[in-house]
């Protein structure tokens, strides 16, 4: 069983109790209980820390960060479909068009994912700091929560640029906005000050928690974007951070899909994951339900689960076609005619066989997409016991070892003027060999160009919330692709929501957007 989920489940019970207490004035409000009274045991502290980790499950929610980041890249789209599916005031289509709105509810939810999570980390740190209970791993837990907070700040500055920084839960003043450089330096300082307290190697006990490897991946991410964000190359720092992970016990799993299977806690490649479990279903905020996001309702006849699928997000045709037919990763997508578990044709809304065609016939109301246009996600294994009230059993991998190899390869190529070396090939070709099952499609120093590296990043990390950052770093984000015109560079940032600026006048509107 996933050990970290024990704390998660307990945390959810506490959170639900808090929600219930808001409607009962006779209840004792948790926030009013002194921390030194609440934390009587080590388990009390661990459970409180579990609340911060539990919050991470918001990252994969349909109405927030996952969809905003994925649906706005060239790897995915949620088109308006025949019959009025996915109208939603054009919110989904606007994400694809990069017509980002300052009052878009999903962008607001994405911002809130970062800052409600940061506030929760601050609360946990304050309460642990006030507690008089002492135990061996107390300092480690404090450092873990600080690194988790640093990750959330990384997400915030990656997605929104200049953002406020607040670390004191008791400070009720409105925080000032910091520059992206200041935010990144804060993150790096937090890593330097806390990484020594984290576990050095992966164990069943630290599964889903911040480790030294996770912190070093976060460090590498900061330095990988340094040139794009600040105009200064830090490639040696990327390489150094990656080497610190390479010299540990993580490996490339021989089977790519081990990282996404139902019980993917067995993966020795996944470095930092967000654990999910069907037993934790029923709380919509904490669901990971990719099958709902992507599949046609009648695909339940194929997989045997009773949940209602929503026939939404699918891969762009050009992105799907970037896979070689021999690439095993192409199985990440459901394509072609669909059949029930017994072999009978699955029908679409037109009464003909459901056929996930790569081609998407239209984007919006004047030319809607067909009921079964677009290949669908099959990357995370679907189990028959899930339904609309339950999470999938797959844990969501935020960082994988393959990412570490690719970051080091990119840094080496950029350091070498964009040209691959044998050292680069030694990093990338093992990923390539896993994808094809042999060395027949390995890169050479002439075939592995920067454009090809970007394409390979897309295939390896499809729908893992990497693509937006990669496209921006490779200066491709503003270019035109299917259904989207070329855009000005200001869309490299999502707009800080107007509601946030109204509440905190210290925050300036994001340049380029109409407020």
Image (cartoon, rainbow, N blue to C red):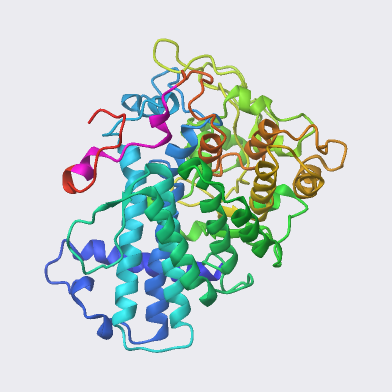
Q: Is residue 13 left or right of residue 456?
A: left
Q: Quadrant of the N terminus?
A: bottom right
Q: Does 21 sit left or right of 475 as displayed? A: left
Residue 439 belongs to the span the image colors magenta: no
State the residue in front, 328 or 383. 328
List x then y, in percent, for residue 125.
Answer: 34, 73
Taking the spot 40% from the left edge, 10% from the top edge, the residue there is 366
Residue in the foreground of this view, choosing between 174 and 351 = 174
Assign the C terminus to one quadrant of the image: top left
Q: Position of residue 153 (x, y in %)?
A: 40, 55
Q: Which residues are magenta?
A: 487-501
Taking 44 as reference, is 160 above or below it? above
487 or 188: which is nearer to us? 188
Q: Is residue 113 above or below residue 341?
A: below
* Rendered residue at 54%/75% (across/down): 196
- Report the label total: 0
Splitting the image into 4 quarters, where does residue 377 fall?
Answer: top right
Residue 494 occupies which quadrant of the picture? top left
The residue drawn where x is 71% and y is 67% is 249
Q: Can you see residue 415?
A: yes
Q: Nearer the viewer, residue 29 or 35?
A: 35
């Amino acid at each position: 069983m996933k050990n970290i989920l024990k704390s998660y489940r307990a945390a959810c019970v506490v959170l639900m109790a808090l929600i219930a207490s808001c409607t009962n004035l006779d209840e004792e409000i948790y926030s009013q209980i002194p921390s030194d009274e609440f934390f009587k045991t080590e388990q009390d502290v661990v459970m409180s820390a579990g609340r911060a980790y539990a919050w991470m499950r918001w990252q994969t929610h349909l109405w927030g960060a996952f969809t905003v980041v994925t649906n706005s890249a060239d790897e995915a789209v949620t088109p308006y479909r025949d019959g009025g599916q996915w109208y939603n005031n054009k919110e989904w289509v606007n994400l694809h068009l990069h017509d980002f709105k300052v009052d878009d509810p999903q962008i607001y939810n994405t911002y809130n994912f970062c800052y409600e999570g940061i506030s929760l980390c601050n609360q946990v740190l304050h309460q642990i700091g006030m507690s008089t209970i002492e135990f061996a791993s107390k300092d480690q837990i404090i450092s873990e929560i600080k690194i988790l907070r640093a990750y959330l700040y990384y997400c915030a500055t990656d997605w929104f640029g200049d953002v406020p920084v607040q670390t004191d839960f008791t400070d009720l003043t409105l925080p000032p906005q910091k520059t992206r450089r200041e935010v990144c330096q804060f993150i790096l300082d937090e890593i330097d000050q806390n990484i020594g307290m984290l576990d050095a190697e992966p164990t069943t006990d630290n599964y889903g928690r911040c480790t030294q490897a996770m912190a070093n991946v976060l460090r590498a991410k900061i330095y990988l974007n340094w040139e794009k964000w600040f105009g200064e190359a830090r490639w040696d720092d990327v390489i150094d951070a990656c080497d610190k992970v390479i010299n540990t016990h993580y490996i490339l799993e021989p089977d790519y899909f081990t990282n996404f299977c139902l019980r993917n806690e067995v993966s020795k490649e996944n470095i930092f994951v967000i654990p999910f479990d069907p037993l934790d279903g029923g709380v919509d905020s904490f669901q990971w339900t990719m099958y709902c996001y992507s599949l046609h309702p009648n695909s339940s006849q194929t997989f045997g689960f009773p949940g209602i699928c929503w026939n939404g997000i699918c891969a762009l045709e050009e992105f799907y076609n970037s896979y070689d037919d021999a690439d095993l990763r192409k199985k990440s997508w459901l394509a072609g005619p669909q059949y029930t578990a017994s072999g009978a044709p699955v029908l679409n809304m037109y009464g003909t066989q459901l056929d996930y065609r790569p081609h998407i016939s239209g984007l919006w109301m004047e030319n809607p997409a067909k009921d079964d246009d677009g290949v669908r996600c099959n990357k995370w294994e679907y189990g028959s016991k899930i339904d609309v009230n339950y999470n999938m059993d797959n844990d969501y991998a935020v960082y994988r070892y393959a990412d570490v190899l690719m970051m080091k390869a990119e840094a080496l190529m950029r350091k070498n003027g964009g040209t691959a070396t044998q050292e680069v090939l030694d990093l990338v070709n093992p990923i390539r060999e896993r994808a094809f099952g042999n060395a027949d499609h390995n890169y050479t120093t002439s075939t592995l160009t920067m454009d090809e590296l970007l394409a390979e990043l897309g295939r390896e990390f499809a729908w893992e919330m990497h693509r937006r950052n990669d496209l921006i770093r490779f200066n491709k984000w503003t270019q035109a692709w299917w259904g989207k015109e070329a855009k000005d560079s200001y869309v490299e940032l999502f707009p800080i929501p107007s509601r946030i600026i109204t509440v905190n006048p210290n925050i300036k509107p994001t340049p380029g957007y109409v407020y």
